[in-house]
Image: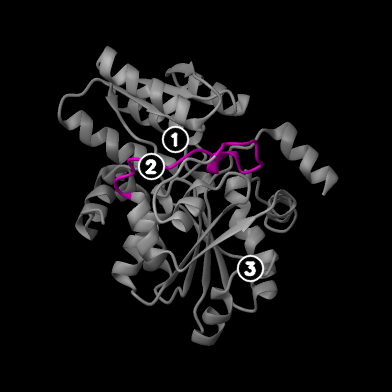
Amino acid sequence: MSSLSLADVYRARQRLAGRAAHTPLVASPSLSAHAGAPVYLKLETVQPTGSFKLRGATNAVAQLAETGVTRVVTASTGNHGRALAYAARALGIEAAVCMSSLVPRNKVDAVAALGARVVIAGRSQDDAQIEAQRLASEEGYAFVPPFDDARVIAGQATIALEVLEALPDAATLVVPLSGGGLFSGVAFAAKAIRPSIAAIGVSMARGAAMHASLAAGQPIEVEEVPTLADSLGGGIGLDNRHTFSLTRALADDVILLDEPSIARGIVHAYRQERLVVEGAGAVGIAALLDGRIAGAERAEEQGGPIVVLISGANIDMAVHRRIISET
């Protein structure tokens, strides 16, 4: 398993001070009634870049800046690239972001608007990763992985500190799961502080690479296909060093959702919670609505709340309007 420590997480929080938001934790009466247990939403949607990714990117870039690095590059499905571009600009560092042709146009434009060099490469996250590593080796950029990096994981883990400081009796965490940087960081820090807490990962059924890798017992390649939860797309890397082992050790359950369920989560967030969220940000809500969270019964028995991490708001608004009108 990774050598990540709780001390790394607290140091990451110090680096994030003034650079990333301490996000709200709000009660959801509608989901609480549905689950039969108190439900709270952790709103990473209010980060300056619209997603949790700012935490990990900022922690990584800040550490690199301390060593004199002046150029950084990454591969991204959109949100990490936007976060890296934001963090790099704040620290006076040049950034390049490689993305596949599957990344929605609104996310590509958001990265470019922050002054980063945008490179479109191939039709998968793996293709974008290859191009980012080429830029690192041939053009002198420092590569910042989107998830499989101890600095990035520690940054994402700061979410758990905020959750448990605000809600010490939290019984279940429901966390979007893709490459595992968010899930493994949050689950690691939460269980280090409160060992009894349950950590449940949620992903889409279409191309869930971490779920398939866990089932296979090792990282494997999975075809990346279009999904409403586009931020959860991409592989975990066959040479995965951190997130596969952390997720395997820390996940109490992994749930897969079909596309109609994800759409219902987006609609519920808008109509009941007054939130605009992207598909990846809606999967926890969708899992609760589908009655898929086994931890709900455990939380009710323990008298402890369920915390659903709402990871991002960066949905194409034309897509959002279509989903709201059709669902």
The quarter of the picture where the N terminus appears is bottom left
Query: Compared to 139, does 209 lie above or below?
Result: below
Question: Residue 314 in the image: x percent, y percent?
Answer: 58, 37
Mark 2 or 1: in front is 2
Question: Residue 306 in the image: x percent, y percent?
Answer: 53, 70
Q: Which mark is residue 80?
A: 1
Q: Earlier in the sequence, mark 2 or mark 1?
A: 1
Residue at 49 percent across and 56 percent down: it is 24
Q: Earlier in the sequence, mark 3 or mark 1?
A: 1
Residues under numbered marks 2 and 1 in contact, where contact means CB atoms less than 8 Å apart = yes
Q: Secondary structure at mark 2?
A: loop
Q: Between marks 2 and 1, how big is the CA–CA gap?
A: 9 Å
Question: Residue 199 in the image: x percent, y percent?
Answer: 45, 66
- 55 sits left or right of 231 in the view: left
Q: Secondary structure at mark 3?
A: loop
Q: Which residue is labeled 3 in the image? A: 292
Q: Between marks 2 and 3, how big is the CA–CA gap?
A: 26 Å
Q: Is residue 169 magenta?
A: no
Q: Earlier in the sequence, mark 2 or mark 3?
A: 2
